[in-house]
Image: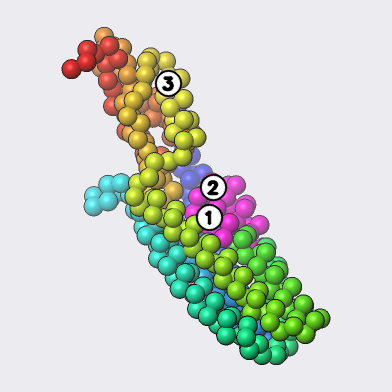
Amino acid sequence: MDKNMHGAKGWMRAATYASTATALLLISLKAWAWAATDSIAILSSLIDSLLDGFASLVTLVAVHHALVPADREHRFGHGKAEPLAALTQATFVTGSAIILVIQAMRRLFNPPALGDSQQGIALMAASILITLALVLFQSFVVKRTGSVAIRADRLHYLGDLLPNMAVIAALVLVGITGLHWLDPLFGMAAALYLLRGAWMTGREALDMLMDRELPDDIRNQVRDIALAQEGVLGLHDLRSRQAGSTYFFQMHLELPGHMPLTDAHEIADQVEIKIRDRFPGAQVIVHQDPHDISPA
């Protein structure tokens, strides 16, 4: 098991390094394409890649902290660093999208002629292939490790494929029709896409920071696991939260009042083990209550 865990950590680190390196390469390609075309659509894609680079660094740091066990000063681990970083990222994305909208509005009413659109199309096509290769590698790592952080980063890059294709479509349409106002229009659409992503990321980060209860399907799975354990007569005060990729569960198990303490402890241990088997890495706290206790 230790060997498997060591291998999982290696794949997770490799995925974060690959993501960061890919972001830097995409930034270079798109900066080149923007310089060649002066396209606002390519500028929007360049800004998105800058945000991807920031997000990849966040993921790298988050995974690094996720692999560090709890210490004396952080008894619950370091998972809250991930939503804090995500909230910072959402704020940065929002500011960048607003700047992009302002630039697109200016060009919408006074659109300049584009430069070498063929070179821009070639560079954007290359960026799509590079992004696709990264997504395939991240998919492999997620399958091997189940990492939530890598899965989130993969979804981020997967969501970039469609906007990048839209940028190529904008350059082609401008070249065919000569309607240069199509370029800033595509840029504004990309800005709205960024704002939507920022809203979703920020909302998820705030939910995690405020210790919002986990979805009902997860809570119901935990409840079913506990109630299926032999000797458990009931369950109450089930609480849940998430910090980074770690789930936390607290509950009160109702057990026969005459049961010896050692037997009650063994049942609680079995419930904790089965919950952790279903949700690897979860932290579980179980309190045993007599089922037949008289109400106060």
Q: Magenta-highlighted stretch: main secondary structure? A: helix
Residue in the picture at 24% in, 13% down: 293
Label 3 – label 2 distance at C-alpha: 29 Å
- Image quadrant where one finds the C terminus: top left
The amino acid type found where label 1 is placed reads Ala
The residue sitting at the top extreme is: 258
Residue in the picture at 52% in, 66% down: 195
Comes first in the chain, label 1 or label 3 = 1
**Is 198 placed left or right of 46 in the picture?**
left
In front of the other: label 1 or label 2?
A: 1
The amino acid type found where label 2 is placed reads Thr
Residue receiving disc 3: 227
Measured as percent of width and height from the top left, residue 140 is found at 62, 52
Residue in the picture at 34% in, 50% down: 210
Query: Is 217 included in the stretch rendered in magenta?
Result: no
Measured as percent of width and height from the top left, residue 4 is found at 51, 44
Q: What is the crowding at mark 2: few (fewer than 14 residues within 10 Å), some, or many (at least 20)?
A: some
Measured as percent of width and height from the top left, residue 160 is found at 62, 65
Label 1 – label 3 distance at C-alpha: 32 Å
Measured as percent of width and height from the top left, residue 272 is found at 38, 30
Residue receiving disc 2: 145
Query: Is 145 included in the stretch rendered in magenta?
Result: yes
Instruction: Tell me, for residue 59, which label it has, or none.
Output: none
The residue sitting at the right extreme is: 176
**Is 132 placed left or right of 10 in the picture?**
right
Comes first in the chain, label 1 or label 2 = 2
Residue receiving disc 1: 152
Q: What is the crowding at mark 3: few (fewer than 14 residues within 10 Å), some, or many (at least 20)?
A: some
Query: How many numbered badges does the structure rendering display?
Result: 3
Q: Which residues are magenta?
A: 133-156
- From the viewer's side, name the closer residue of 16 and 93: 93
